[in-house]
């Protein structure tokens, strides 16, 4: 407060003496405001986490798993070939019966989990129990029970276990992870480094983190999470589970304040499906998509770079509903779509067989389509075959920093493309051109320009001319590489 007063005093020194009363009023007012802010901060910072820890502890469990692992060579030093000690240690190991293949042995692992129903359903990470043939649950009370595996989901690293108890078990409920804000207090509990039940506290450091999976929605926290915390709960201040502690970022394997918890809104859907079916049953739309970047939005004449741009529509629910490559999905089941990750999560969380309303932008106008979702697990792994078409006569041309040629049957075969593929194959890319910077390479196939098919070099030239005449600054190309499509916007200036 002293430094603030000094600053104001210096500013007010040049004012007439009659302003002294105003200066005092301002000083008192600022002091009162700062006192109110300090009081508000004090009210939001808990004096202690003890009451919360006491409330949630009975529902958190330690998990010990064991499995039989194949035996390798017996333990011993690793020596380079030709080392003078190599023969000595080999003779020593042979004499002691350790030189041959080791017998299979049991391996143990530790993790954490939490009870979500009084009849004994327990949530943990899949990697905690993966491959285990024996799972033992230790409760906060010290009781131990054997658990059986109900189901797993490798995509979110979630597993559901079940124990049989002769009495109702204390349990916790899921909270709404979407309500968590960066800076909110959170508490993690689990079995770090096998030390037993342990509580750590911190804040939400970031939201909507993705690590590797299509369904990732991690809460990042600085609450201490270490090995052994995997599968344990992340609580809000109401004692509700808002995340499942899954991973850490660390150069040494220990906590450095960067931990990741799978968001409860993802986990609760997975748990419900595992509990009902023993497996996941995610919705499937049947499209390939990419984000709408600012340059793609400009090339398409869109007012905002949001939504999910469809790059391909193989046989499936979306094709049956009339969706087309180049459509931009802006609304799914009544909710706006921010980007591709958002759409993937929304579709996955929708019931299989349900008809949903999808709003797409097509050639500047919105259309509402009704799509009956399929099941992702059934559709995965199925190959899509590009319909056959008559190839164009070979010809070459240069534009947009690209040298392109009309695709011939021999070109298609050499590139490993399906029979009947059509478009313009890129035979060279100027390394100083924007096309190179955006990842276009020799062997890529251009199938559309300006959301129209291109079969001949002249088609591409016409699309460039049309875009310039329309005042566009860029042209949208649909590129295929190894069968995977993506849109790229190239500048026309």
Image: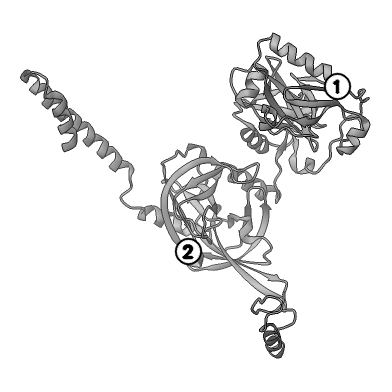
Q: Nearer the viewer, residue 6 or 106?
A: 6
Q: Is residue 31 left or right of residue 242?
A: left
Q: Position of residue 408 (x, y in %)?
A: 91, 29
Identify the residue at image location x=67%, y=85%: 89
Q: Position of residue 373 (x, y in %)?
A: 74, 33
Q: Height in image: 112 above or below 479?
A: below
Check the image and tell me how it is coloured: one colour
Which residue is tagged 2? 140
Which residue is tagged 1? 455
Question: Which of the 4 image quadrants contains residue 213?
Answer: top right
Label 2 neighbour load within 10 Å: few <14, some 14-19, many 20+: some
Q: Secondary structure at mark 2?
A: loop
**Can you name the residue that lies furthest to the bottom here?**
95
Q: Secondary structure at mark 1?
A: loop
Specify the quadrant that holds the N terminus. top left
Q: Height in image: 26 above or below 153?
A: above
**Distance from the alpha carbon under mark 2 to that under mark 1:** 68 Å
Q: Is residue 126 left or right of residue 285?
A: left
Looking at the image, tell me whether mark 2 or mark 1 is earlier in sequence order: 2
Q: Nearer the viewer, residue 405 or 252?
A: 405
């Amino acid at each position: 407060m002293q430094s603030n007063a000094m600053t104001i005093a210096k500013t007010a020194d040049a004012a007439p003496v009659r302003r002294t009363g105003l200066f005092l009023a301002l000083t008192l007012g600022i002091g009162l405001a700062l006192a109110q802010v300090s009081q508000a901060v004090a009210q939001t910072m808990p004096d202690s986490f003890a009451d919360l820890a006491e409330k949630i502890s009975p529902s958190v469990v330690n998990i010990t798993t064991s499995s039989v692992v194949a035996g390798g060579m017996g333990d011993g030093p690793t020596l380079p070939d030709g080392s003078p000690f190599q023969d000595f240690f080999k003779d020593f190991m042979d004499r002691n019966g350790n030189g041959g293949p080791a017998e299979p042995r049991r391996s143990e692992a530790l993790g954490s989990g939490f009870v979500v129903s009084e009849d004994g359903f327990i949530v943990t990470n899949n990697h905690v129990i993966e491959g285990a043939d024996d799972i033992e649950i230790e409760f906060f009370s010290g009781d131990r029970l054997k658990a059986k595996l109900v189901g797993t989901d490798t995509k979110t690293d979630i597993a559901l276990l079940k124990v049989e108890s002769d009495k109702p078990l204390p349990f916790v409920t899921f909270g709404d992870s979407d309500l968590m804000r960066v800076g909110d207090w959170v508490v993690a509990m689990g079995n770090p480094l096998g030390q037993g039940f342990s509580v750590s506290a911190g804040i939400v450091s970031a939201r909507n983190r993705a690590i590797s999976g299509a369904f990732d929605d991690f809460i990042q926290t600085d609450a201490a999470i270490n090995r052994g915390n995997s599968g344990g709960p992340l609580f809000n201040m109401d004692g509700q589970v808002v995340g499942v502690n899954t991973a850490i970022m660390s150069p040494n394997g220990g906590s450095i304040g960067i931990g990741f918890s799978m968001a409860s809104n993802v986990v609760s859907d997975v748990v419900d499906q595992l509990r009902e079916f023993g497996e996941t049953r995610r919705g499937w739309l049947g499209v390939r998509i990419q984000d709408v970047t600012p340059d793609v939005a400009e090339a398409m004449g869109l007012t905002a770079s949001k939504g999910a741009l469809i790059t391909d529509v193989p046989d499936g629910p979306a094709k049956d509903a009339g969706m087309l490559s180049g459509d931009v999905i802006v609304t799914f089941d009544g909710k706006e779509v921010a980007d591709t990750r958002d759409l993937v999560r929304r579709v996955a969380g929708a019931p299989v067989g349900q008809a949903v309303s999808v709003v797409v932008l097509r050639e500047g106008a919105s259309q509402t389509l009704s799509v009956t979702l399929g099941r992702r697990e059934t559709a995965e792994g199925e190959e899509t075959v590009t319909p056959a078409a008559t190839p164009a006569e070979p010809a070459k041309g240069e534009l947009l920093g690209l040298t392109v040629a009309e695709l011939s049957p021999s070109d298609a075969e050499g590139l490993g493309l399906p029979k009947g593929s059509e478009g313009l194959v890129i035979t060279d890319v100027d390394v100083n051109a924007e096309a190179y910077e955006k990842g276009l390479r020799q062997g890529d196939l251009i199938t559309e320009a300006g959301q129209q098919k291109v079969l001949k070099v002249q088609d591409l030239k016409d699309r460039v001319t049309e875009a310039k005449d329309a005042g566009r600054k860029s042209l949208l190309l649909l590129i295929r590489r190894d069968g995977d499509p993506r849109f790229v916007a190239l500048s026309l200036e």
